[in-house]
Image (cartoon, rainbow, N blue to C red):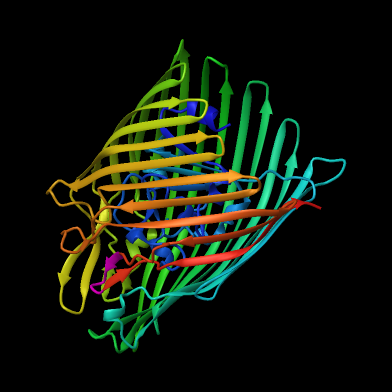
Amino acid sequence: MVENVESEAPASITAVSPEQVKTIPGINLDDRLRNVPGFSLFRRSSSVVANPTTQGVSLRGIGSSGASRTLVLWDGIPVNDVFGGWVYWTRFAPEELALVEISRGASTSVFGDRAMGGVIHLFSREPEPKRVTARYEAGNRETHDLGAGFSHVLRGGPWALSGAGRAFSTDGYFVVPRDVRGAADRPAGVRFVSGEARADWLGSRDRFFLKADLLAEDRANGTAAQRNSTSLGTLSGRYFRQFGAQSLSVLGFHNRQEFRAVFSALAANRETERVTFRQSVPAEGAGGAGVWSLRRGAWNLHGGGDAFRVEGYSRDYLVPSGLRLGGGTLLQHGVFVQADAAAGPVRLYFGARRQVTGQRQTFFSPSAGIAAGRKRLRARASAYRSFRAPSLNELYREFRVGNAVTLANASLRPETLTGVETGLDWVGESSRVRVTFFRNRLEDLITNVTLRVSANEITRQRQNAAAALNRGVELETLGRWRWLRGEAAYLLADSRFSTGERAPQIPRHQGSLQITAERGGTLMSAGVRSFAMQFEDERNLFRLPGFATAQAVVRRRIRGGLSAVAAVENLLDREFFTGFTPTPLIGAPRLWRVGLRWDGRL
């Protein structure tokens, strides 16, 4: 399945199997995907302690703020936050996923403006009769992770029911170094509960699912006063029918949510803090799409349309008194067509999209590609033009991180990207090598521009910065030797503004190495991730040194579907910097967990 997907696309696609997800340490899915070259969240952060508004995805260094420039789909349904575009990684139980596909390079000709930097597809496990999963893990810093799932195909019919739930809590860790902590500092931690329930119709020619998922989380943000919480619910469904060489897919979703936060200003010695405002952000979003496909072997044709509407408001209750209100409604819709045709070993791809943004603007996004294969070698190239409209969050919501204040900007214009890439794939029986060269030209990139810097406060505003050039190369290798498997990945991403400064939050070099051994019911995996120096701000005033961390996991099958597992991240307890506010921020120390997992049938 994985190789078929890759052979039918001119872009660089990484497929992460469920076994790979299980062998990479990490509490949430974002930590486990960091081995993929170019995958990162804002400020090198982890969803374990990061503010949700910074959990947008960046691929290949496209994007220098918390807004996501990558679309995340869960069984075809968009899961990016409807108000701000970020991703709540606590919604997904990694063990319940069947496959993760990461497609780098713009995909707006099919998926719209939220896919300017690429698409991440999450696929749930297929329902099985009487399948049950359960796990409990405990670790340092009062970490507890409890999860369960089930699925069953009803007897005598195509109906199937499935569901999963997860409860997690941790006291977390301090996000500022020991030598600058004051009485106001507290560990940053999270407590959340998430769950989903789903009904499937598994017909011979048509399939349908209806799903509801919920999330409630509460976060301590590192000081006595600063906290945030989120409650959200989503109802979604998708219908697919195959009739001969044609197929039709229709999907829709509705989301309601509220984000709440408390912001404060800290004294220079961090001994005291003062609440500045309390924020409430209710939002509601709905969308739908329809895709018709015709497959003729030598050529294929796809066409469709979609629409997305969101309404949300940022309500800031100022202290001691006052109300600041911003927000509104965005309605986007578009139509697209995509075709591919084969001529011997060569396959050509063409795509186009016409999109109406919520700002009374229309964009045209064309794309083209070519792929040619011979035996184990495959060459590919593609070119595209894409865009991203500013979110309601960027237009209307103000926020603070420590003593760094970021202002909203209702006058933001859409970002645009023009890109080309070319690559080679070599696939052997027990090894694989993929190399891709890319060049992206960005115009009107939305980033946080520094307005003022003082000893106690930094003031920034979201603005359309000067043009930026993003270019580089990514390399992925995989090899298997009997019961050993090795994976290595590297990304060079040189992203600079036209004025010469480096784009913030983007390291020039990053890479990973993972070695896994599995034999006789025992699995052992160890890896290293490395990130070069990067800058906190667009002026390149605050430099974040490079760092490397090691992680490991051991799993032993006890009996049947029962296994014991132990995992550790940042094995050497390396302290590394993630940002400046202007106080330096640090990442996760050594975190370990041990527990039991069950995956089998009753």
Whether residue 66 is visible: no
Residue at the left extreme of this rendering: 499
Q: Position of residue 35 (x, y in %)?
A: 42, 48
User: x, y (%) of residue 216?
Assistant: 57, 69
* Residue 459 seen anywhere in this rendered image of the structure: yes
Give 457 or 101, whichever is nearer the viewer.
Answer: 101
At x 27% / y 80%, what residue is drawn?
Answer: 179
Range of residues picked out in magenta: 577-583
Out of 140 and 396, give the one closest to the viewer. Answer: 140
* Residue pictured at 45% horizontal, 30% vertical: 432
Residue at position x 39%, y 63% in the image: 572
Magenta span includes 582: yes
Query: Relative to residue 127, is residue 341 drawn left or right?
Result: left
Q: Is residue 342 above or below residue 85?
A: above
Residue 457, percent from left and from top: 21, 76
Eyeballing the image, is 153 above or below 446? above
Indicate left or right for 191 with 414 as reference: right
Left or right, 482 with reference to 43? right
Q: How many marks?
A: 0
Q: Does 181 sit above or below residue 212?
A: below
Across and down, in percent, residue 461 comes to: 24, 64
Image quadrant of residue 19?
top right
Q: Residue furthest top?
A: 344
Residue 547 lies in the magenta-colored region:
no
Say which quadrant the N terminus sits in.
top right
